[in-house]
Amino acid sequence: MDLEKTKKLSLIIPNEKNKLFKNKKLWGSVAQFCAIGIYNAALFWSPDVIVLGGSMTKSLNLDRIREYLKNINTVLPKFPPIKKAKFLDKSVLYGALLFAHQQKLKNDTQKALQ
């Protein structure tokens, strides 16, 4: 992607440097879509807790998401708690490192058993 396209994209992607980042209506829509996705995930996997991570998570209003969830939940008697990841935008990196470590252990174990 060239630099001009990157600059144009930065105008429409919410970030701390543009007006969209502070647009409450936009974040209300984001919270509503997140609630729908979270609800579907909870229905499929029945988690004990839902942890949200990533760089945009710090901008999410969890209370608003919880309110949307109360309105759309017709199946689950008690919805699991929703929390923000401790490491937010670094959580993906730590998850990838853990996965790589687990794969290395798995490969080392398989080699040792051969």
Image (spheres, rainbow, N blue to C red):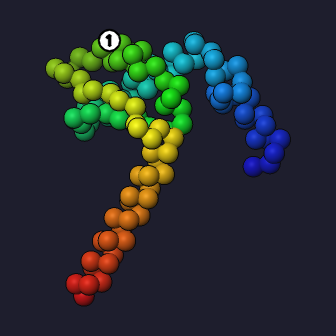
The single residue placed furthest to the left in the displayed view is: 77
User: Residue most toward the front?
Assistant: 86
Q: Determine whether 113 is above or below 93 in the image.
A: below
Q: Can you give x and y, in whole percent of width and height, for residue 21 in the image?
A: 64, 22
At x 79%, y 37%, the residue is 7
Q: Is residue 87 left or right of residue 3?
A: left
The residue shown at (66%, 21%) is: 20
- Locate residue 22, reporting x and y percent: 63, 17
- Vertical relation: 80 (above or below) 69: below
Image-based side of 71 in relation to 77, left or right: right
Q: Residue at x 41, y 52 (%)?
A: 95
Q: Is residue 6 shown left or right of residue 71?
A: right
Q: Which residue is mark 1?
A: 71
Which amino acid, mark 1?
A: Asn
Categorize mark 1 by other alpha carbons within 10 Å: few (<14), some (14-19), many (20+): few
**Residue that appears at 23% across and 23% down:** 79
